[in-house]
Image (spheres, rainbow, N blue to C red):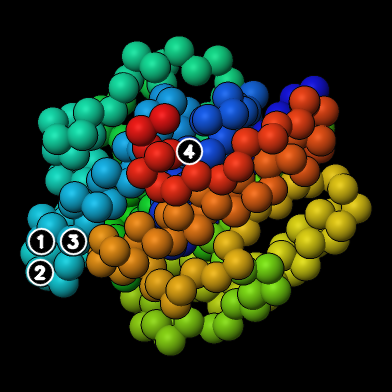
């Protein structure tokens, strides 16, 4: 069996997935191949370094910090998120990322990004010792909120523009068992975003990106429909929130985000028996615990 795990993005909503992955860590369920897009890969690396609870600590301590994100950063550096703080000071000084553990992870780690010139998805392997996290930043580079990010010879934007839920890449890589962690409820239908017209004007020099922005809702909805069909057929195991509590992509309230984390943790524990049967593992009788018990475990 080769296990693939795919994590959708969603900025602040991805705290749901952090609850899910902490529950997976408790059961020692680790993938052979991990692919994430946008915040899905940014948060996912803490799961792969087995730092249970690290993402929640960052959410609770720093996301409401003025140094983390806000309009003033957008006006100053044209990035809504303060990249030097989020991707350097936090992991390298404040809440240390375990590079040794990440390097020791035996599987493959991939970030989905969108090439700004072609508009197509590319799947870049995440370096294990890059303390600037350029590949992660590129995957998170939402239109308007980020500037394009250079990796190697090319410039990239958020991977979700071209492949919002890149589970098919895991299948192509030979994963015969796949877990997909969503940040939207089952049945969610994406509509054209209000900022779409602004984005298309900003990126008129990059017609492929404009096309991605125009067709993204249609492609996303088709992908979700296909994913739900594969879930019903037992081909893929999906973990999705029952509710996201109306949380938007730039939510910073620690109390609200902790609630969504707990939704992810409890949802994963609720589905753990079915997941273990899907993976051919011995079933557990553990009952879901609350957040604090989960972090202290």
Q: Which residue is mark 1?
A: 66
Q: Residue at x 40, y 72 (%)?
A: 247
Near-viewer residue (293 or 135): 293
Give the Cα separation between the discs numbered 3 and 2. Answer: 14 Å
Give the Cα separation between the discs numbered 3 and 1. Answer: 6 Å
Q: Which residue is mark 2?
A: 72
Q: Residue at x 59, y 54 (%)?
A: 267
Of the two numbered discs 3 and 2 on the same chain, state the one appearing first in sequence.
3
Report the residue that reaches farthest toward the right. Answer: 233
Q: Which residue is mark 4?
A: 22
Of the two numbered discs 4 and 3 on the same chain, state the one appearing first in sequence.
4
Q: Which residue is mark 3?
A: 64
Q: Nearer the viewer, mark 3 or mark 2?
A: 3
Q: Nearer the viewer, mark 3 or mark 1?
A: 3
Of the two numbered discs 4 and 1 on the same chain, state the one appearing first in sequence.
4
Give the Cα separation between the discs numbered 2 and 1. Answer: 9 Å
Quadrant placement of the N terminus: top right
In contact (CB < 8 Å): disc 3 and disc 2: no
Q: Quadrant of residue 133?
A: top left
Q: Is residue 262 left or right of residue 130?
A: right
């Amino acid at each position: 069996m080769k296990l693939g795990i795919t994590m959708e993005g969603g900025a602040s909503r991805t705290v749901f997935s952090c609850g899910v992955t902490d529950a997976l860590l408790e059961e020692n369920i680790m993938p052979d191949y991990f692919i994430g897009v946008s915040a899905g890969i940014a948060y996912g690396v803490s799961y792969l370094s087995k730092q249970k609870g690290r993402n929640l600590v960052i959410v609770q301590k720093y996301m409401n910090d003025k140094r983390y994100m806000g309009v003033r950063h957008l006006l100053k550096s044209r990035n809504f998120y303060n990249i030097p703080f989020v991707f350097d000071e936090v992991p390298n000084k404040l809440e240390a990322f375990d590079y040794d553990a990440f390097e020791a992870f035996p599987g493959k780690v991939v970030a989905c990004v969108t090439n700004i010139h072609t508009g197509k998805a590319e799947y870049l392997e995440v370096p294990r010792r890059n303390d600037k996290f350029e590949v992660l930043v590129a995957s998170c580079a939402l239109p308007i909120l980020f500037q394009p990010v250079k990796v190697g010879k090319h410039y990239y934007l958020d991977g979700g523009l071209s492949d919002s839920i890149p589970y098919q890449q895991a299948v192509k890589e030979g994963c015969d068992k796949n877990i997909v962690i969503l940040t939207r409820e089952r049945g969610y239908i994406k509509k054209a975003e209000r900022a779409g017209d602004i984005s298309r004007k900003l990126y008129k020099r990059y017609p492929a990106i404009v096309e991605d922005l125009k067709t993204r809702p249609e492609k996303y909805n088709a992908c979700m429909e296909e994913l739900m069909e594969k879930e019903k057929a037992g081909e893929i195991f999906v973990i999705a929130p029952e509710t996201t509590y109306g949380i938007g992509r730039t939510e910073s309230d620690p109390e609200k985000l902790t609630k969504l984390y707990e939704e992810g943790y409890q949802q994963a524990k609720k589905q753990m028996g079915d997941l273990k049967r899907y993976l051919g593992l011995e079933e557990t009788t553990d009952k879901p615990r609350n957040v604090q018990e989960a972090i202290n475990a």
